[in-house]
Image (cartoon, grey):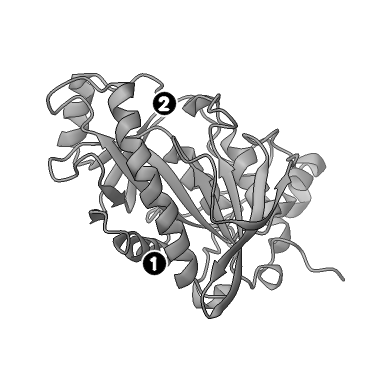
């Protein structure tokens, strides 16, 4: 009997996935690369995946997969991204741990443009996105109280600190649809809610990563103070800060790879779907069960 690709037996080796955000469109450190175009039961991903290895001193090379979420040439709006296809494709390629890189606005004085934040909470203000693999005859409810994976987040934060960047630990990232930036009233409201940063892409990405049983951490690159601070956000200012931030992100990825263990037993990914499915297997529509095979098939 063959090993199911979603089972623990098939996912014993750590494979790092990286989703690049605004400005991060390639991983220069990847070696032995190939471009892989995939189809998924949820449609087409943002573009081809780059699969390769990251060299590590005194360790075996680490298999890694990179995808720019906005597609080649940055042509896809935050609400146009097919998050389900992106995450499904990463799991098809064996990813167990996912580092998501995203440009964000700061809602706190201490988080200056150019700083890095590793949030541990999210507030969802999106309205027009597919947020789950489940539905159409199969009901599942994963736990999402702690939406990032602490072990991976800690290693990623430590990796970022080696770059010399100012790194902030924790806080809530509020996620909006965009593509317009917030109004000043919204920005002030989010500050009163206690959010630390604001972005447009971490959700439903993090929710889908949880359903796909990928460990997840967000590397949030502060590019501006949103509009609460002193002036309107401009794309020109964002891009200027983003270019410096991208170099930090690339160095962080390399340093994270050096810290990752070889086996998932040493840095577990969440077994989120183990007791999440409410629908009896014999009541599942055959086509939906087939579509969800990589997500829950190893439990069925």
The image quadrant of residue 112 is top left
In the rendered structure, find residue 183 and report the number of the disc placed on it.
none
Residue 113 x %, y %: 23, 39
Residue 198 against residue 170 in the figure, above or below: above
The image quadrant of residue 114 is top left
Residue, disc 1: 155
Foreground pick, 289 / 10: 10
Residue 224 x %, y %: 24, 33
Is residue 293 left or right of 75 when viewed as pictured? right
Q: Name which of mark 1 and mark 2 comes first in the sequence.
A: 1
Residue 79 against residue 292 in the figure, above or below: above
Q: Are marks 1 and 2 in contact (CB under 8 Å)?
A: no
Residue 26 against residue 166 in the figure, above or below: above
The image quadrant of residue 184 is top left
The number of numbered discs placed on residues in the rendered structure image is 2
Q: CA distance from mark 1 to mark 2?
A: 29 Å
Residue, disc 2: 177
| Any part of residue 123 in sight | no
């Amino acid at each position: 009997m063959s090993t199911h690709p979603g089972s623990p037996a098939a996912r014993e080796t750590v494979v790092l996935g990286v989703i690049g955000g605004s400005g991060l469109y390639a991983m220069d450190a990847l070696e032995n690369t190939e471009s892989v175009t995939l189809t998924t039961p949820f449609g087409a991903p943002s573009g081809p995946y780059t699969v390769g290895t990251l060299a590590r001193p005194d360790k075996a090379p680490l298999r890694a997969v990179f995808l720019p979420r906005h597609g080649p040439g940055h042509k896809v709006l935050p609400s146009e991204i097919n998050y389900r296809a992106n995450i499904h494709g990463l799991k098809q390629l064996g990813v167990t741990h996912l580092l998501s890189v995203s440009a964000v606005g700061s809602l706190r004085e201490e988080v200056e443009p150019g700083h890095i934040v590793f949030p541990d909470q999210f507030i969802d203000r999106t309205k027009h996105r597919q947020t789950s693999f489940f539905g159409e005859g199969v009901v599942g409810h994963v736990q999402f109280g702690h939406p990032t994976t602490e072990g991976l987040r800690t290693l990623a934060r430590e990796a970022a600190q080696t770059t010399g960047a100012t790194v902030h630990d924790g806080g809530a990232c509020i996620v909006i649809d965009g593509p317009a930036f917030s109004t000043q009233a919204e920005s002030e409201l989010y500050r009163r809610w206690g959010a630390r940063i604001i972005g447009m892409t971490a959700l439903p990405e993090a929710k889908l990563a949880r359903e796909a049983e990928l460990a997840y951490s967000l590397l949030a690159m502060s590019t501006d103070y949103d509009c609460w601070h002193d002036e309107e956000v401009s794309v020109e200012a964002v891009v200027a800060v983003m270019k410096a931030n991208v170099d930090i992100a690339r160095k962080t990825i390399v340093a994270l790879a050096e810290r990752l263990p070889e086996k998932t037993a040493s840095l577990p990914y969440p077994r989120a779907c183990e007791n999440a499915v409410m629908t009896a297997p014999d009541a599942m529509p055959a086509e939906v069960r087939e579509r969800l095979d990589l997500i829950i098939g190893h439990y069925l």
